Structures are given as C-alpha cells and as structure tokens.
Image (cartoon, grey):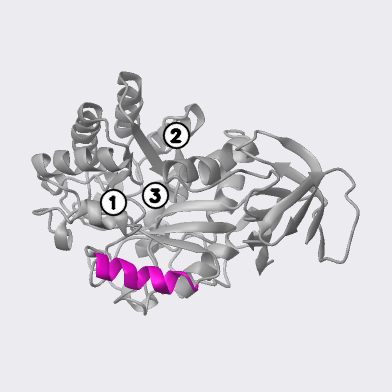
C-alpha cells in the first residue's frame, strides 16, 4: 500500500507535514516525498490527516456474559470506525475477568478481532474489594493493567498492597473514584438538575475524597495510577498537585465530560446518565484546562453500550454510560481543536501516544520500521452521528454534526475501515 500526499501528524516523532507513506508486510517501509508507485494499492490522502492509530484504554465490550449489548467483534468494528487500532477492555464482565483461565479465554477470542483488543484484569476477586486477585499471575498471562472499573476500592490497606505489587510489575492501576457514602443516587450531578428531575444525585465530593486519598497512596507507593473518567474541577486540581509532588499519577477524560454539562440530562434524559455524572460548566472548563496543561494525559471513551430497552427505563433504573468509540475523535476535533483549546498534535498525543506509552504498547509513530497502524481523517469534513457499527445506539450525540470524518483505519497494514 502507498499513501500519497499524507498530512502526517505524528505525536511520537513530533513531525507534522506532508509526505508519502509506503506499507509492506504490516510495517511502514518508507516515508518520503514523491515516492514512486509500484504494484500496490494507492490511497490519495490529499487534504487528510494521517496519524498513528488511536488507542482507547477504557472500553466495555460486554464479553463474556452481556453480549446482547456488545461483543468483542462488534466493539472492534465500532472502534475501527472511530479510528482506533488498539483498545483495552475493562474487566467487569459476567463473569468478571479475575482469573488466568478467564483472561486467556478472552485473549484467544480477541486475537480474531479486526484491531488489537487487550484485556484488563480486575484488582480484587469478584470486584468485591475484599481480596486481591493473583496480580503477578495475571501479569504473566498478559493482562493489560489492573482495574475494578465501575466499583471503587474502599479498603485502603488492600489498595496500598495492590499498588505496591503493580509498582513491582510496572503495570498501571486504574481507579473508579466514587465514594458511595456521598452518592444519594448515581447518574446525575447533585445540584439544580438533580432537583428538577427529582433524584438525589451524585456529589462531586464522592469523587474528590477518593481522588485525594488515592493520589497520596500513589505518591507513597510510587505506583503508576490512572484516575479514570475524571469529572470534577477539584479532582483535576488534586491530580495537578499530586504530579507536582512527584506522584506517578495520570488521568483520563471522556469526550462527554469535556463536551457536555449536567444540563444535557434535561434534554437527553437517560442518554446523558453517566457514572461519574456530567457536571457543571465550571467542571467542564477545568477538564479542558487539565487537557491543555497536561494534568489530564488521556482521552478515553468509557465506551459503555446498553440496549435501547435498558435506556428506555425511568432515570433511576436505567444504566449509566454511552456508546463512545464512533464519536470520540469527532468530538475531540469539534470541541477541542476547532474550539481553539488543543492543536491536532496535542489531540493525537492524548488519543494515541500517551495511552500507548502508559501500557508499554509498541508505538514508533510514523517512521520506517513502525507497525502500520494508522488513522486517516479529514478535520474539515463533517459527518452526522448515527448508523452505528456498535450494537448499541445509546448516545446523546446521535444526529449531531461533527468535524473529523474518519476515511480509513489501517491495522497491521490492512484497511479495516473505509469511510
């Protein structure tokens, strides 16, 4: 394959400019100007950005056990449509991924997906927060980090022990930060909107107190700790402070948290129900500032597919989360780049280089010898959200016009999506 007239935005080498890219046997073999065509497929990328394939470190493919919502293969297709070549699945499946046997079963299935799909391990057995899984065995079996995503770990001594082992293994621990003590009801921010819809709501305090606790444990253990789907202005400031103190702490933000506020619940109902919830405009702006100054390292979707029937329930009974892989890049381009907050290079750092680095994924960028995992998109071309590759359609962005249409996703040198 030869990609002509590619406007390369490579956050690994920091190169930005127009060159041709030749691919053979799954690798990039040449990068240069006016490369000669040989007997190969030619893609003309004039007017389009070519970047390393996107990496999402926080997705739910619901496999095993909940595959009416999504499965490994439909999730992978949704990821490819969104420009992703690598994703990491959370472990809160049914059963949860807390043993080597379950991990290996999923890994075997993931090998057959159209992109690279990796599996995280739980931190605790059964997500019960009482006993650690065999973290060393799960690491040896090739898990992609540790997380009890969806459930906070309330036992500080247990969490400290998990961080110490993860530090020894050089594996990241990712934490869902919502103290149930301060949750009247999940899914919506505790404030004016929660009052209007007649539910108790989730206070930002629930997130803030656990983030404060956990970044300090991280500081003292030296563990690599990722604060998942950060939503509170105070939590952003706590991560910023912890980094200044020398903690090996990272944070991820979702597109819905840097795009929407709690007001979306009044317009979209359960489609805007999230854990942690959409918060105030002040919180949204703090997340954007965190993305700008590097306090927030990653953009991760928390892709959370649900059936239409589940989301059609009353607010208090409906599950939280949205399908996010097919809108992530578009929301980043539309809200952050066109909004003047980030450059395309900075956006690619948050969506490709930084997450790959955290998980020790080979990412040599767009250079000779690198894996040919690429996304080609047009930041000036719009698309209408819909016609999902995911099994799920639960998104408040359906019907919205976004910039950043994905034209091709290339994994291991093969086109796995054409827009």
Q: Secondary structure at mark 3?
A: loop
Where residue 77 sits, quadrant-wise, is: bottom right
Left or right: 253 in relation to 7 = left
Q: Is residue 102 magenta?
A: yes
* 1 relative to 295, above or below: below
- Of mark 2 and mark 1, the one earlier in the sequence is 1
Would you say the residues marked 3 and 1 are in contact, meaning their CB atoms lie under 8 Å apart?
no
Where residue 97 sits, quadrant-wise, is: bottom left
Question: Magenta residues: mostly which secondary structure?
Answer: helix
Q: Secondary structure at mark 2?
A: helix
> Between marks 3 and 1, how big is the CA–CA gap?
33 Å
- Find the magenta span and give its range: 100-112
The residue under label 2 is: 285
The residue under label 1 is: 146
Q: Is residue 285 visible?
A: yes
Left or right: 103 in relation to 372 = left
The residue under label 3 is: 263
Where residue 306 sits, quadrant-wise, is: bottom left
């Amino acid at each position: 394959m030869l990609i002509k007239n590619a406007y390369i935005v490579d956050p690994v080498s920091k190169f930005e400019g127009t060159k041709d890219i030749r691919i053979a046997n799954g690798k990039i073999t040449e990068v240069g100007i006016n490369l000669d065509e040989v007997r190969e497929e030619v893609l003309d990328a004039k007017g389009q950005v070519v970047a390393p394939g996107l990496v999402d470190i926080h997705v739910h493919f619901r496999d095993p056990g909940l595959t009416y919502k999504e499965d490994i293969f439909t999730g992978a297709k949704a990821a490819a449509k969104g420009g992703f070549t690598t994703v990491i699945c959370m472990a809160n499946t049914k059963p949860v991924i807390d043993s080597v046997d379950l991990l290996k079963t999923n890994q075997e299935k993931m090998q057959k997906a159209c992109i690279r799909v990796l599996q995280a391990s739980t931190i605790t057995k059964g997500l019960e927060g009482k006993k650690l899984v065999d973290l060393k065995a799960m690491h040896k079996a090739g898990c992609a980090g540790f997380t009890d995503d969806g459930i906070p770990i309330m036992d500080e001594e247990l969490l400290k022990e998990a961080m110490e082992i993860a530090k020894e293994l050089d594996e990241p621990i990712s934490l869902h930060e919502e103290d149930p003590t301060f949750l009247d009801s999940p899914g919506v921010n505790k404030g004016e909107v929660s009052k209007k819809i007649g539910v108790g709501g989730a206070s930002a305090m629930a997130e803030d107190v656990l983030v404060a606790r956990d970044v300090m444990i991280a500081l003292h253990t030296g563990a690599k700790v990722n604060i998942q789907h950060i939503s509170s202005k105070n939590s952003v400031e706590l991560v910023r402070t912890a980094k200044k103190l020398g903690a090996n702490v990272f944070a991820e933000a979702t597109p819905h948290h840097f795009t929407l506020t709690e007001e979306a619940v009044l317009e979209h109902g359960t489609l805007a129900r999230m854990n942690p919830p959409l918060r105030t405009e002040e919180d949204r702006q703090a997340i954007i500032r965190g993305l700008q100054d590097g306090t927030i390292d990653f953009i991760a979707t928390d892709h959370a597919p649900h059936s239409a029937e589940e989301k059609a329930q009353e607010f208090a009974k409906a599950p939280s989360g949205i399908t996010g892989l097919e809108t992530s890049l578009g929301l980043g381009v539309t809200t952050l780049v066109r909004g003047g907050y980030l450059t395309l290079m900075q956006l690619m750092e948050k969506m490709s280089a930084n997450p790959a680095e955290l998980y020790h994924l080979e990412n040599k960028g767009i250079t000779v010898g690198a894996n040919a995992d690429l996304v080609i998109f047009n930041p000036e071309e719009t698309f209408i959200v819909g016609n999902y590759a995911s099994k799920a359609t639960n998104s408040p962005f359906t019907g919205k016009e976004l910039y950043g249409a994905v034209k091709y996703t290339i994994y291991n040198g093969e086109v796995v999506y054409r827009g």
